[in-house]
Amino acid sequence: MKTTGKTVNIPKLEISDKERSENKLTPESIEAGARLLREAGLVVIESVLPRDWIAELNVAMQTVLDNENEEDSQNGEHPMLKMPFMDPRVIDNPFAMPILKAAMGEKIFAYLPYGCNSTQPGCDIQWIHRDSGQLFPELPFALPVSTIVVNIPLVDFTVENGATEVWPGSHLIIDDPAVRNSPYNVCDEDRAARLPSFQLEMPAGSVVVRDMRCWHRAMPNRTQTIRHMLALVYFRRFHHSPDAPGIFSRRIPEEIWTDMSEETQEVYRFQTHD
């Protein structure tokens, strides 16, 4: 994809057939993925989840969104704390997790339920923004990553259906005070236009590990189909706050909790459960 006269390559981690079949990255792949995350601000691992299962998850996700205002969700029985959304392939993804831990340490944590970014047909272009700013924005340099989002597209992401536009390397940019105090750390359009960007074209069932400081935006969906993408946020250990917003206090059903591996329970250790 051409932007400002330059060709930008999507930072993809190429893995072997053996890694795919065994659902396990080699130490060399983990190191390469962590390096891409550190330098570009994101890393893409294409087509690592079964397409037929992802298609089923996409249908289930649309059902949740269609019924999100029903009484069941309001009474604490959140539908995304049940299967198929609690599948280990999502909440303990074997390709994302080792890169997350290489970047932020073994004691990372997350909350449930996770989110879903959906782009409706006919939507407008979104503003350029970061999901989180620099940890100490007054410093003239960026610190190592402390919040990361893992995205899983539930349909093929194309230019036509509004694949997310991302600015590689933007996680290292230091904002001026006006930007720091804007909602969602909204970025200046003129400044962004001078820097290379690309749209995240990728097959359904890919996995993206992205530094949440990266500039990005949703693009117009010119198809007739809603574009869904799962979004799971992970934190360095020091971020935990017991008074976090109410969504983080949702209870996980005990039958789901007990089926989790010890490693997964450790990641979600601050989550309440029955």
Image (cartoon, helix red, strand yellow):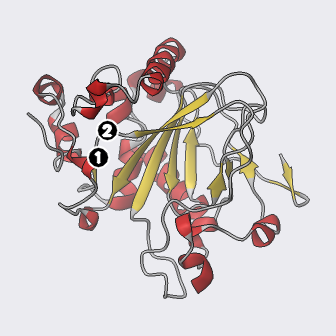
User: Which quadrant would the C terminus be assigned to in this image?
Assistant: top left
Q: Amino acid at mark 2?
A: Pro
Location of mark 2 (residue): 113
Q: Toward the viewer: 81 or 147? A: 81
Please tell me how crowded label 1 is: few (under 14), some (14-19), or many (20+) other residues with Cα within 10 Å.
Answer: few
Label 2 with label 1: CB-CB less than 8 Å: yes
Above or below: residue 214 compared with residue 20: below
Quarter of the picture containing the N terminus is top right
Q: Residue at x 57, y 73 (%)?
A: 182
Q: Nearer the viewer, residue 91 or 113?
A: 113
Q: Position of residue 200 (x, y in %)?
A: 67, 42
The label number, if any, that marks residue 247 in the structure image: 1
Residue located at (71% from left, 39% from top): 123
Q: What percent of the width, then of the height, locates residue 110?
A: 29, 49
Badge 2 marks a residue whose secondary structure is loop
Q: Spot the residue most to the left.
A: 274
